[in-house]
Image: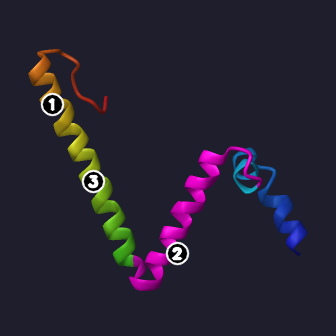
Amino acid sequence: MLNVLANLILPIPLVAELVYWRDLKHSGAAFGLGLVLLFSLTFFSVISVVAYTLFFTLLASLSFRVYKNVMQAVQKTGEGHPFK
């Protein structure tokens, strides 16, 4: 059963690279994020983890937008919208 499951999942090149740790940065980041997710789910509910993740993603994108607007105003460049 495990062999069949491995044959279904591992042919995807990105998943195989993550599982076999061929690229240490990507595999380490995936392992770290998975570990943080599992630890956070032991202390908080799923809805709380999802809500806080989306909140911090929104906060990061808004901070990036404000930073780009301030840099555009200071340097007087016409770069435009940072997400376009």
Q: What is the span of residues highlighted in magenta in the rendered image?
A: 20-46
Q: Is residue 30 above or below residue 2?
A: above
Residue on which the image places disc 2: 38
Residue on which the image places disc 3: 58
Q: Position of residue 55 (x, y in %)?
A: 28, 61
Check residue 28 for magenta coloring: yes
Q: Position of residue 82 (x, y in %)?
A: 27, 30
Residue on which the image places disc 1: 69
Q: Are marks 1 and 3 in contact (CB under 8 Å)?
A: no
Are there few (<14), some (14-19), or many (20+) residues within 10 Å of tag 3? few
Are there few (<14), some (14-19), or many (20+) residues within 10 Å of tag 1? some
Task: Name the chief secondary structure element in magenta.
Answer: helix
Q: Is residue 32 above or below residue 62?
A: below
The secondary element bearing badge 1 is classed as helix
**Three-letter amino acid code at the position of disc 3:** Leu
Check residue 4 for magenta coloring: no
| CA–CA distance in space, label 2 to label 3 | 22 Å
The secondary element bearing badge 2 is classed as helix
